[in-house]
Image (cartoon, rainbow, N blue to C red):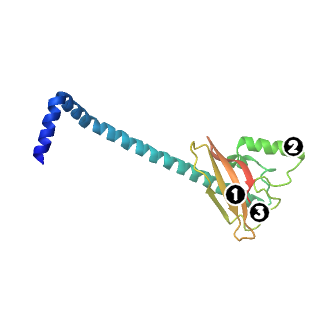
């Protein structure tokens, strides 16, 4: 068998001469560069996925913290939309706060609590808040979060919350009732 390869090599060398040797050497020399580039690309893809997962996780945690705080305020008979808004600014986008303020100034009050999409809340909501990301952001700028308030089937309330990333962290920008 080795005689066969020897004949093939001699034939190739005869027809292609040093061209074959030069190309083989180039291929051997360039292999580490190609391998390193491929490894770097794969590592970058993994880092990007980790970054997106972290962004989604941070957004979900921010939503959970907001609803824990917000429902606690309501239980203490404090209404965050009409009282001190400094704490609310930590959780809600400036654009959403302006929109709500404009709506209150025009209509006098809101028919429904914007953040709950309900007129009232149930007692078990504050101690039973679950949230999960519905999407994995490609740009780490916004995440859609599914929120469930309540423990039992009869008390569960479902919301869809869009949070936006800004310099201060994740802020609620839109809340809708989920069927």
Marks 3 & 2, CB-CB < 8 Å contact: no
**For this rendering, which residue is in front, 130 or 62?**
130
Q: Position of residue 151 (x, y in %)?
A: 69, 69
Determine whether the residue tagged by mark 3 lies in a helix, strand or loop: helix
CA gap, disc 3 to disc 2?
25 Å
**Residue tagged 1:** 67
Q: Position of residue 22 (x, y in %)?
A: 21, 30
**Residue tagged 2:** 105
Mark 3 vs 2, N-terminal side: 3
Who's the residue at 53% across and 50% down the image?
Answer: 54
108 left or right of 35?
A: right
Determine whether the residue tagged by mark 2 lies in a helix, strand or loop: helix
For the C terminus, the image quarter is bottom right
**Residue tagged 3:** 75
Indicate the quadrant where residue 65 lies. Answer: bottom right
16 left or right of 37?
A: left
CA gap, disc 2 to disc 1?
25 Å
The residue mark sitting in front, 3 or 2, is 2
Mark 2 vs 1, N-terminal side: 1
Categorize mark 1 by other alpha carbons within 10 Å: few (<14), some (14-19), many (20+).
many
Categorize mark 3 by other alpha carbons within 10 Å: few (<14), some (14-19), many (20+).
some
Q: Where is residue 164 in the image (x, y as percent from the top left)?
A: 65, 45
Mark 1 vs 3, N-terminal side: 1
């Amino acid at each position: 068998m080795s005689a066969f390869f020897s004949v093939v090599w001699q034939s190739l060398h005869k027809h292609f001469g040093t061209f074959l040797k030069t190309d083989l050497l180039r291929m051997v020399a360039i292999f580490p560069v190609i391998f390193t580039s491929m490894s770097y690309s794969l590592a970058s893809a993994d880092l990007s996925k980790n970054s997106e997962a972290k962004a989604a996780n941070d957004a979900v945690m921010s939503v959970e913290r907001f609803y824990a705080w917000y429902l606690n305020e309501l239980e203490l008979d404090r209404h965050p939309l009409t009282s001190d808004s400094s704490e609310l600014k930590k959780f809600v986008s400036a654009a959403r706060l302006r929109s709500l303020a404009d709506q209150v100034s025009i209509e006098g009050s809101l028919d429904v609590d914007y953040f709950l999409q309900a007129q009232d809340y149930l007692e078990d909501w504050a101690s039973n808040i679950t949230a999960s990301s519905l999407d994995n952001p490609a740009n780490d700028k916004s995440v859609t979060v599914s929120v469930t308030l309540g423990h039992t089937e009869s008390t569960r309330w479902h919301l869809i919350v869009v949070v936006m990333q800004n310099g201060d962290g994740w802020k609620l920008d839109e809340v809708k009732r989920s069927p």
